[in-house]
Amino acid sequence: LERKGQVILYGPPGTGKTFWAERTARDLTALREFGQLYAVLDVAQKSAVETGGFVRTCTFHPAYGYEDFLEGYRPQSNAGQLVFSLRDGIFKRLCGDARRNRDSNYYLIVDEINRGDIPRIFGELLTVLEKSKRDHKIQLAVSGEPFDVPPNVYLIGTMNTADRSIALLDKALRRRFGFVECMPDSTILDNTSLQGVPLGPWLDCVNRSIRQRVGRDARNLQIGHSYLMEKDRPIGEFTRFVQILQDEIIPLLEEYCYEDY
């Protein structure tokens, strides 16, 4: 983040990409504001991190647009009449707060970043997103206002590699982001065994079968460890394991093996 200004956490489903994005942003904010990791802060300090607006989140989807992210006209009721007014998007508001408070860092987590139409959402922002071009002014297309991205603004995106829309990430965007791979980690399951089924080795075995049998993209179609976790801990009941297997893992495998049931 310090080198590029923005990173994307990418990997198969269930590998904790959103978890690590949120934890990273909170920890970096806590270190900046109080000199300690978020987990060891007192209640008042944690509240300051949560309510201070230092960490914000949005989710990209096919209907998400430039007007949601930067600025655009939105309908609102005015004395019983429907009018359109110019409103700032989440990233423009974040940049405004960061510009007024240069001593703090601001983080925007963009969940499912590859599900949106990224060139349309980012627009001219791609020009000034690079770390070397922060504080350089551009003119926004809708309002005509001068705009820059302060150096104390950071973006953390998450991307599910099982989603074929990864192809929407063009080379211009890739060059501006750093990429951190998140893969299944069976060691997090902590030697948990349920009625003779050791969860870590079981998950490794399933993923090994996927890599051998599913096809050339199998590495990105593995099953993440978070499927077998609840509240940051491995599941502790065999009946829960059976439910997860029946309701989530088997349907996912059926999707992966659609042409070879």
Image: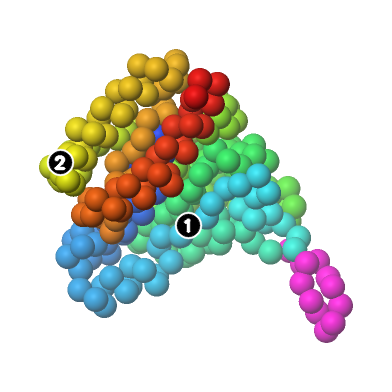
Q: Position of residue 32 (x, y in %)?
A: 27, 59
Res 196 label: 2
Q: Position of residue 161 (x, y in %)?
A: 46, 32
Q: Label 1 crowding class (10 Å Cα cut-off): few <14, some 14-19, many 20+? A: some
Quarter of the figure with residue 171: top right
Q: Label 2 crowding class (10 Å Cα cut-off): few <14, some 14-19, many 20+? A: few
Q: Position of residue 183 (x, y in %)?
A: 32, 33
Question: Does 252 appear in magenta?
Answer: no
19 left or right, relative to 172: left
Res 173 label: none
* Residues marked 2 and 1 touching at CB (< 8 Å): no
Quarter of the figure with residue 232: bottom left
Residue at image x 57%, y 48%?
A: 60
What residue does disc 1 label? 57
Residue at image x 18%, y 47%?
A: 194
Work out whether residue 119 or residue 62 is closer to the camera in this orientation and state it.
62
Work out whether residue 55 or residue 130 is closer to the camera in this orientation and state it.
55
Q: Main secondary structure of the magenta part?
A: strand
Amino acid type indicated by mark 2: Gly
Q: Is residue 98 above or below residue 213?
A: below
CA gap, disc 2 and disc 1: 40 Å
Is label 2 in a helix, a strand or a loop? loop
Q: Give the farthest residue toward the bottom.
A: 79
Q: Specify the segment rendered in magenta.
A: 75-86
146 left or right, relative to 222: right
Quarter of the figure with residue 46: bottom left
Work out whether residue 250 or residue 114 is closer to the camera in this orientation and state it.
250
| N-terminal-most mark, 2 or 1 | 1
Amino acid type indicated by mark 1: Thr
4 left or right, relative to 58: left
Q: Position of residue 6 (x, y in %)?
A: 43, 41
Q: Is residue 112 above or below residue 143?
A: above
